Image (spheres, grey):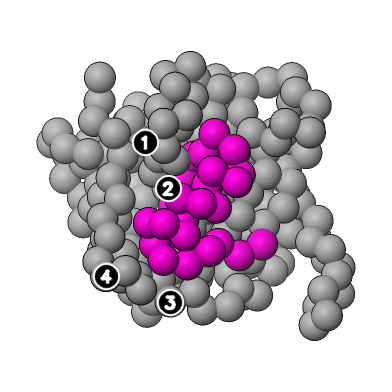
Amino acid sequence: MTVLLDHLVVAAASLQQGVDWCQATLGVPPGAGGQHPLMGTHNRLLKLATPAFPLAYLEIIAIDPAAPPPGRPRWFGLDEPELQARVRQAPQLVHLVARSTQLDMHRYGLIAVGQQPGEPIQASRDIPASATMPARRLAWQILVRPDGRTGCGGALPTLIQWAGEHPAQAMADSGVALQSLVLHGLPLRAQDVLRLRGVAQHAGPGPAITATLHTPRGQVVLQTAAAA
């Protein structure tokens, strides 16, 4: 069974830095997001969906200075000193999340081929009421490693399974669309487990993630940093 790209993850030193980067780089401001009490982070979101990548979006995420420490490493390697140093200079594409309707099956499949996809945890965030929508809660199950790090330099997707509403269903079109996505460094056996639809994959060296976006500023290419 295949999995689908859910969202791209851009880490920022602060949410305002991420908002400014989005406006300057992509030509549009991100939409609303929320807080993640479980991890002490908060985000802003931008719809990227196309027929090839249905419900795909961009997540700009930062450590929430108003939240208490989570008592464990945060997801996506946000606590790593090297990443924190890089995002102080500018927000960075760091990872991708892929959605599955068979999370346990894909998790055990990745373990069987030597990967460390993480442990399943339950997460949620509340969305306040707006002029057109009542208050509601998004809920999901997600795989997170105990050390919070990502696998294969970021090319091994974090797997998520939504419970009910998907956030992109309520997002307005942004004028930004994901044209293509290329991964480098995900072993062939892991590729066979995930069968990530619409994504070009290469087991050899290269940027872990290359995303090409159509934006009001023209074509924009986002890449993860080269491995040290």
Query: Which of label 4 and label 2 is nearer to you?
Result: 4
* Residue position for label 2: 96
N-term-proximal mark, 3 vs 4: 3
At 69% from the left and 69% from the top, the residue drawn is 165
Mark 3: amino acid: Gly
Q: Secondary structure at mark 4?
A: strand
Q: Residues within 10 Å of mark 2 (few under 14, many from 20)?
A: many
Q: Secondary structure at mark 1?
A: helix
Indicate whether 120 appears above or below 197.
Answer: above
Q: Is residue 209 left or right of residue 134?
A: left
Residue found farthest to the left: 204
Q: Secondary structure at mark 2?
A: strand
Q: Are marks 3 and 1 in contact (CB under 8 Å)?
A: no
* Residue position for label 4: 218
Mark 1: amino acid: Gly
Segment colored magenta: 7-32
Q: CA distance from mark 1 to mark 2?
A: 7 Å
* Residue position for label 3: 175
Q: Are marks 1 and 2 in contact (CB under 8 Å)?
A: yes
